Image: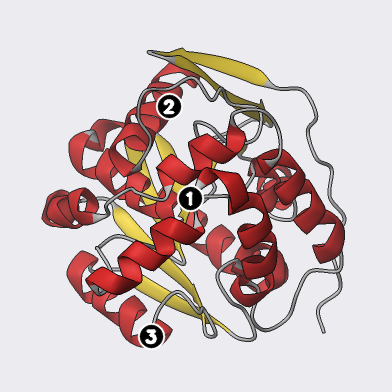
Amino acid sequence: MNTTPTTDRVQASAFLTRPGGRIAYDIAGSGPLVVLIPGMGDLRATYRFLAPPLREAGNRVAVTDLRGHGESDTTFASYGDVETAGDIAALVTEVGGPAVLVGNSMGAGAAAIVAAEHPELVAGLVLIGPFVREPHVSAPQRILMRAAMARPWVATVWNMYLPKLYAGQRPADFDSYRKEVVGNLRRPGHAAAFSRTTHTSHAPAEAKLGDISAAVLVVMGDKDPDFPDPQAEAAWIAQTLHADVVMVPEAGHYPQSQQPAITTEAILAFLAKVHRRA
């Protein structure tokens, strides 16, 4: 079992004004910019084990909440991959890029769109448990999922589902972090925003994959329950984007917190390669 790394979570939030609301983020460190993007239903604290060593290695690290999540506003008219991509592009422009974008789950799809549409803003991509294409889901399954993620009970359903997403080794603080995530969903407006986010399509990300020229690293948990065959999905993405792949043992959808030592080592090696090219 891995030793849980020491964290130095940055508490102060900054806010990026966007049409319809504000996006919360924090930024610290000096050096090349790295932007960490969480997935749907998650908080920027999902990177609580990854951000500190990236800063210590000489990077300026920005960690953002998705719109309608964490400290970001719930007043936006729409949510999804395309909207998140616009927020990330605006954030990189605001704080001064280019950046290596690190995206988990839906955040990976958004990062892929930014890399395709704004190559000048993206020095590299790290895709963790990435949704960069629409999964094959039957119509009845889609209806059931949308019903389960409806606003009145989405916090309860997410609380029950999270342990499945953490298949394999869980972080030592899983119970307290799970409470933090679910507690955030119970704040006014957040359940509705999350429910609307679950309707996003990853087809726009898939349509842009051929336009990506940046170096790419795929990090996939070998037990990720969101994919029928995580290794096959990682291999498909790698072939499509000419990417390197790191399969993380005993990790589900969140290797950045389940196996932080392995994930951090892989990302630092990738950053070194990107920075050498630059």
Q: Residues under labels 2 and 1: Cα distance?
A: 12 Å
Residue under pointer 2: 92
**First of labels 1, 3 by sequence position:** 1
Which of marks 1 and 2 precedes in the sequence?
A: 2
Question: Is the residue marked by circle 2 packed among few (<14), some (14-19), or many (20+) residues within 10 Å?
Answer: many
Q: Is residue 114 visible?
A: yes
**Circle 3: is it few (<14), some (14-19), or many (20+) Cα within 10 Å?**
few
Residue at image coords 49%, 19%: 75
Q: Quadrant of residue 2?
A: bottom right
Give the image location of residue 29, x and y in percent: 69, 32
Residue 93: which numbered mark, if any? Answer: none
Percent position of residue 272, x then y: 50, 55
**Residue 227 at x, y percent in the picture:** 40, 78
Type of the residue with mark 3: Pro
**Which residue type does callout 2 highlight?**
Val
Residue on which disc 3 sits: 228
Q: Position of residue 42 (x, y in %)?
A: 60, 49
Residue that mark 1 sits on: 102
Near-viewer residue (215 or 71): 71
The front one of 7 and 84 is 84
Q: Point out the frontmost of discs 1 and 3.
A: 3
Asked if labels 3 and 2 touch by Cβ distance under 8 angstroms, the answer is no
Amino acid found under the numbered disc labelled 1: Val
